Image (cartoon, coloured by chain):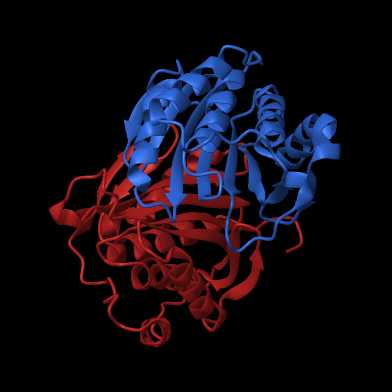
Chain colours: A blue, B red
Amino acid sequence: MFAGAQVSLYPMTDRFVDVIVSSLTALDPWRDRLRIETDDISTLIVGPPEVLFPALRDFYAAAAGTGHHVVLRATLSRGCPGEPDDPICQTSALANPAQPLSERQAAALGVLADAVETGQTADAQFSLYVMGAGNHMAEIMGSIDFLKNSGTFNRSKNFCTRLSGDAGVVFAALQQAFCCFGPPEGHVTIDLTVSANSPSAR
Amino acid sequence: MFAGAQVSLYPMTDRFVDVIVSSLTALDPWRDRLRIETDDISTLIVGPPEVLFPALRDFYAAAAGTGHHVVLRATLSRGCPGEPDDPICQTSALANPAQPLSERQAAALGVLADAVETGQTADAQFSLYVMGAGNHMAEIMGSIDFLKNSGTFNRSKNFCTRLSGDAGVVFAALQQAFCCFGPPEGHVTIDLTVSANSPSAR
């Protein structure tokens, strides 16, 4: 299995380089379990979902804590058939697809009760894509039903779902959506945007 | 059919609101053929690909022309089974999937010869997702082969493909990738990032 993300941070300030560099230190506790490579457009972070999502949460919370309007953008993927297996991605976080949707939804909700509070609000929107499966819409709708009961659901928008809440529970909910829906051998991706300190009304 | 995008512009400057507002005027010539709705995270633009992509090109080129480091982000979608049909999305731009990949690739390359020059460079990366089809990877690899011959191909990255060139040809190539691969009745999405004036080396 290969899993990871292309991640970018966009601070809407003249001091954007300082905000990016200082926020990146929040990844330090996670670095030994991730492979990280940066270019001018994004940072590739390779690793299992149970490390990747908390690392993104801490990176986002550090950036949001600067008080600037910042946006974290990520293209997350697991099981892309075009990528090689990588031992660093070994994970026990994926749900058993033989379990009915309702059981997977209940288990995902149970995990959220343990989410860490960060003190930073996350206004997120994301699209979950499940490929190669027979009925991809059933899995996508199943994850949306889970999110509606997660306490983070804000509203459905065209092409995506809007979440709001403390960054701790929002990133935990995103991790569950990524891990519990779509087959473990399948190709699942998320297109994610998380915004902090926007001057626009929600 | 329903088609469109959730679009955001991220100017890395204290004057980000001014850059966004001034760049939005570039959409004016396209507005009568699009439905546009804005909230605090993104702008929904609904319309057919042959209007949507040139509109995004002009929006990006206007923002890049300010000289600031700006990033345009878009979640594009066509044929999502969860969305209603909308007459504004009526299009003749989608390829016939009964045509072999090689013919669709050749037709897509032919269109690029007529691409408008904008004078602005676009450093883009994107992921194309084809859902619900039997062999989604064949269509995705077919679009990547087209891009490798398009003059815009920069390199393959994990989870995405990197393009560079004048914004005119880059957005035209993206439009062909979106329209010529995956069935016309299928659910096809693009996760797109386009960066201008980055201080980082490519």
- The quarter of the displayed image where residue A154 is located: top left
Q: Is residue A197 visible?
A: no
Image quarter where the C terminus of chain B lies is bottom right
Q: Looking at this view, is B148 or B133 the one in front?
A: B133
Residue A143: which quarter of the image? top left
- Closest to the observer: B6 or B25? B6
**On screen, residue B56 above or below A96:** below
Percent position of residue A16, x then y: 70, 40
Left/right placement of residue B109 relative to residue A4 reads left
Instruction: Tell me what residue is drawn at x 44 percent, y 41 percent.
Output: A127
* A42 left or right of B81 in image: right
Q: Residue at x 84, y 29 (%)?
A: A29
Residue drawn at the location 52% of the way across and 50% of the way down: A186
Establish if B8 lies above or below B195. Answer: above
- Across and down, in percent, residue B132 comes to 35, 56
Quadrant where the N terminus of chain B sits is: bottom left
In the depicted structure, whether residue B112 falls above or below residue A47: below
- Number of marks in the image? 0
* Relative vertical location of residue B128 with respect to residue B117 in this rendering, above or below: above
Q: Position of residue B14 (x, y in %)?
A: 61, 36
Comparing A88 with B79, the one in front is A88
- Which residue appears farthest toward the left when viewing the image? B87
Asked which quadrant contains residue B184, the reply is bottom left
Q: Position of residue B201 (x, y in %)?
A: 76, 61
Q: Is residue B181 left or right of residue B165?
A: left
Instruction: State the residue at coordinates (48%, 62%).
Output: B61
| Residue situated in front as seen by the camera: B101 or A89 | A89
For the question of whether residue A19 can be seen, the reply is yes
